[in-house]
Image (cartoon, rainbow, N blue to C red):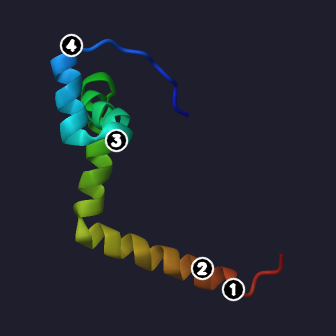
Amino acid sequence: MHKKMTISLDEAVYEGLYRTIGRRRMSQFIEDLLRPHVLDSSLDAGYQAMAADQERETEAKEWCDALAKDMVNETR
């Protein structure tokens, strides 16, 4: 869920932001800049590290595929 917020910027900063990022992308740009400073990113880093581990990802996919095969003949 997004919350709306009003902020004040120096006119030169606003013009540079508008010129560089564009009007419709400013909020996402600012959020992306702030996120690592205000949220605990260790969980994100952990998920990224797990996703980068190809051996682990292969094992997880094999496990999921085997589980799905076990469910094929189950009644609902």
Amino acid type, label 4: Asp
Q: Earlier in the sequence, mark 3 or mark 1?
A: 3
Per the model, the C-alpha gap separating discs 4 and 3 is: 18 Å
The reply to whether the C-beta atoms of the residues labelled 1 and 2 are less than 8 Å apart is: yes
Packing grade of label 3 (10 A; few <14, some 14-19, many >=20) is: few
Q: Position of residue 46 (x, y in %)?
A: 28, 46
> Quick one: SS at disc 2?
helix
In three-dimensional space, the C-alpha distance between marks 1 and 4, rounded to whole angstroms, equals 61 Å
Q: Secondary structure at mark 1?
A: loop
Closer to viewer: mark 4 or mark 2: 4
Question: For the C terminus, which image quadrant?
Answer: bottom right
Q: Which residue is mark 3?
A: 25
The quadrant of the rendering that contains the N terminus is: top right
74 w.r.t. 2: above or below: below
Of the residues tagged 3 and 2, which is closer to the observer? 3
Which residue is labeled 2 in the image?
68
The residue to which callout 4 is attached is: 10
Answer with left or right where residue 64 lies relative to residue 44: right
User: Where residue 33 sits in the image (x, y, percent)?
Assistant: 24, 32
Q: Residue at x 26, y 44 (%)?
A: 45
Question: How far, Cα to Cα, is label 1 from label 2?
Answer: 7 Å
Q: Which residue is mark 1?
A: 72
Q: Report the amino acid beneath label 3.
A: Arg
> Which of these two is toward me, 24 or 43?
24
